[in-house]
Amino acid sequence: RVVAVVGQGESWQFKGWKMGWTDSNKRGLEAPVEVFSRSFGFYVGFEGAPIPHQLMGWSVKKGFLSRDKRGLDSVVFANFWNGLDEWMCVHKRDFLRK
């Protein structure tokens, strides 16, 4: 069961993914837009670094690490887990404990 995908911002990362998901024509889904429409997407980058252009069209939450203030990494990690919890409450409620 896949509920989250961390993307690097390049579509080659998803080449050959089938994930067990199918569209209405029973084809395996592998395009990043399709992957992120069915899972929580997250991108981690450094503050000030350019964001990959392909990433702009994907449904991903972004987290940025500071090169100088590494003590703030925990804030980015907390944003990931909080975002995943929120996403699961909406999209995958049956995976959560009752």
Image (tube, rainbow, N blue to C red):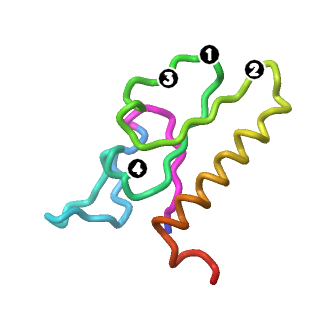
32 relative position to 79: left or right? left
Q: Which residue occupies 70% across, 29% down?
A: 65
Q: List the residue tagged with mark 4.
A: 36
Nearest to N terminus: mark 1 or mark 2: 1
Tell me where the magenta segment starts and ends, as one range: 2-12
Between the residue at mark 1 and the residue at mark 2, the CA separation in whole angstroms equals: 9 Å
Q: Does the magenta run of residues contain 7? A: yes
Q: Which residue occupies 50% across, 53% down?
A: 40
Kindly check if marks 4 and 3 are in contact, taking CB atoms under 8 A apart as contact.
Answer: no
Q: Is 35 in front, or is 72? A: 72
Kindly check if marks 1 and 4 are in contact, taking CB atoms under 8 A apart as contact.
Answer: no
The mark found on residue 48 in the picture is: 1
Q: Amino acid at mark 4?
A: Phe
The mark found on residue 51 in the picture is: 3
Between the residue at mark 4 and the residue at mark 3, the CA separation in whole angstroms equals: 17 Å
Nearest to N terminus: mark 1 or mark 4: 4
Q: Is 27 in front, or is 92? A: 92
